[in-house]
Amino acid sequence: MKDLDIKQESLQIATCKLRNELMKKGDWYDGFVASISSSLREIGVYEPDIEDIAKRVLNRIIGLEE
């Protein structure tokens, strides 16, 4: 696979934009929570706890510790 020529500054800008979008807790946030929830289901996490755990994981990743 060919290496992409991506500048560090471009990655930082993209990361900031993604984090800002996730902080709004809109569609992007919901999509990430759904993806994390799906992974938790695959490993057998007890159903009623899945969404709460997924939100806690995502909030920790984006710095929204409650």
Image (cartoon, helix red, strand yellow):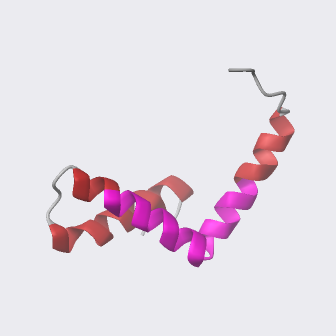
Quadrant of residue 18 within the rendered picture: bottom right
- Magenta-highlighted stretch: main secondary structure? helix
**Res 65 seen here:** no
Figure disc tally: 0
**Res 33 seen here:** yes
Quadrant showing the N terminus: top right
Task: Tell me, yes or no, whether the highlighted magenta stretch contains residue 15.
Answer: no
Residue stretch in magenta: 16-38
Residue at image position (49%, 63%) is: 32
Viewer-side residue, 31 vs 19: 31
In the displayed structure image, the side of residue 21 where residue 47 appears, left or right: left
Quadrant of residue 34 within the rendered picture: bottom left
Q: Is residue 55 above or below residue 25?
A: above
Q: Is residue 40 above or below residue 29?
A: above
Please provide percent x and percent y for residue 24: 62, 76
Residue at image position (33%, 60%) is: 38
Task: Tell me, yes or no, whether the highlighted magenta stretch contains residue 20.
Answer: yes
In the displayed structure image, the side of residue 51 where residue 20 appears, left or right: right
Viewer-side residue, 64 vs 53: 53
In the displayed structure image, the side of residue 24 where residue 58 appears, left or right: left
Residue at image position (74%, 20%) is: 2
Quadrant of residue 9 within the rendered picture: top right
Quadrant showing the C terminus: bottom left
Viewer-side residue, 42 vs 46: 42
Please provide percent x and percent y for residue 51: 31, 71
Q: Is residue 25 above or below residue 65?
A: below
Q: Is residue 21 above or below residue 58?
A: below
Please provide percent x and percent y for residue 65: 45, 63
